[in-house]
Amino acid sequence: MNPIPDPGQLRAELVQRALPEFERPLIGYATSITHDHDAARDIVQDTFLKLWIHEDPASLDGPGLKPWLYTVCRNRSLDWLRRRHRLVSLDSDSFAQFAASTPEPAATASSRDDAADVLRYFQRLPANQAECLRLKFQHDLSYKEIAAATGLTVTNVGFLIHTGLKRLRQLLAPPASRATAASPLLPLPN
């Protein structure tokens, strides 16, 4: 007869396995949402605490753990933002104001290949596109895992990633090709 495993022991083992693999990526993810590294560390600690007290640790062991951790981390990060009144509305007026306040592409053309420039352009994307791209390329989540973490549909995640990448390509293109892409009908030479 097999003894019934102790739930406390299962929780401890699950947290011990998850911590080395997910702590740093989750801190990076929470920091990208909160823009506050100390708050991100607290949020990730809270995420692992929630894992520790989860009713059924066996249900999270395996492929369901990663999206569960990212979902909890995302929700805790958004809660932190709401408490601090830093959550930005994504209505068209605030987006237009944000887009108008970003630096001109010509100002950063000389160092376009630098990773810092890519991140600057990345910040010009709508928040939902940037978040999906971050989860996909920085945290290596699948579309399904991103959908579970954000509450979006898999189709919506795919659309946001596609449009986000398309916009980044436009922003990173040399100024001459951006002008060509913006106006497909060029005047004919005389």
Image (spheres, rainbow, N blue to C red):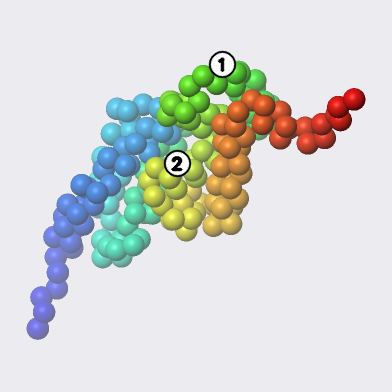
Relative image position of residue 127 (x, y in whole percent): 54, 36
Q: Nearer the viewer, residue 158 or 10?
A: 158
Q: Neighbour class for label 1 at 10 Å: few (<14), some, many (≥20)?
A: few
Label 2 element class: helix
The quarter of the displayed image where residue 34 is located: top left
Side (left or right) of 11 relative to 29: left
Query: How many numbered badges does the structure rendering display?
Result: 2
Residue mark closest to the camera, 2 vs 1:
1
Tag 2: amino acid: Arg
Image quadrant occupied by the N terminus: bottom left
Q: Earlier in the sequence, mark 2 or mark 1?
A: 1
Q: What residue lies at 17% left-to-right and 52% top-to-bottom?
A: 16
Relative image position of residue 128 (x, y in whole percent): 54, 40
Q: What residue lies at 23% left-to-right and 52% top-to-bottom?
A: 18
* Image mark for residue 134: 2
Q: Nearer the viewer, residue 125 or 85?
A: 125
The residue singled out by tag 1 in the image is 107
Check the image and name the residue furthest to the bottom.
1
Tag 1: amino acid: Ala
Side (left or right) of 30 relative to 99: left
Label 1 element class: helix
Relative image position of residue 100 (x, y in whole percent): 65, 20
Q: Is residue 123 above or below residue 149?
A: above
